[in-house]
Image: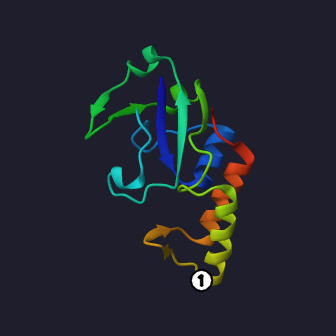
Amino acid sequence: MRLFHRTWAVYASEILEVGFVDGADGFVWMSDVPLDSEQIKGGNSGDVSLVVLLPEGVVNAFPILPRNGYRAFQIPAQQLNMGKVGLNMTDHAGMSRNQLLERIKEREALEPEGKDVVIAGTKFGTAQSLREALALLDKFGSLA
């Protein structure tokens, strides 16, 4: 079964290198579909989506929380780390690698104070967050 976890590129890189770590509540929030940041309580919850492949029996052993259009799961990191973990993306915020490089250049020119920038109505993070996403794509690719 495929489960998804939304996070920031810098944390995704850490997860892909050393594994998930339980949150303060003792588990990691997962979903049965990839979510965008607006679908997650509080929004602004990350710029990349990870996917974990686990046997359905393992997933079903943990609480299933129905949400609006998807199911959420509370799964301990130890269980998630036994599955195959990868990126659920080959782009970043719908941008190819080349488009991402262009946005980084634009962002560096527009953000001397390091603030978020809105381009064509879409809010993107700072140039640093985009560089982290680019490094993540280059290092790990996607889980196909």
Tell me residue 96's x, y (percent).
Answer: 64, 55
Tag count in the figure?
Answer: 1
Residue marked by disc 1: 110
Most extreme residue toward the top, as rendered? Answer: 57
Percent x, y for residue 138?
73, 50
Give whichever of 97, 31 is nearer the camera.
97
Pointer 1: residues within 10 angstroms few (<14), some, or many (20+)? some
Is 89 placed left or right of 68 in the picture? right
Q: How is the image coloured?
A: rainbow
Between residue 40 and residue 19, name the one nearer to us: 40
The residue positioned 43% from the left and 14% from the top of the image is 57
Residue pushed farthest right?
139
Quadrant of the rendering where the C terminus is positioned: top right
Q: For the point 63% across and 34% down, which residue is it?
A: 143
**In the drawing, does residue 138 fall left or right of residue 26?**
right
Q: Position of residue 127 (x, y in %)?
A: 62, 71
In this rendered view, identify the residue nearer to me: 54 or 117. 117
- Give the residue displayed 74% in from the left and 47% down from the top: 139
Q: Amino acid under label 1?
A: Leu
Front position in the image: 128 or 99? 99
Q: Is residue 130 left or right of residue 39?
A: right
Which quadrant holds residue 103?
A: bottom right
Residue 85 occupies quadrant = top right
Residue 131, image x and y in percent? 67, 63
In percent of the image, x 68 and y 50: which residue is there? 137
Tag 1 secondary structure: helix
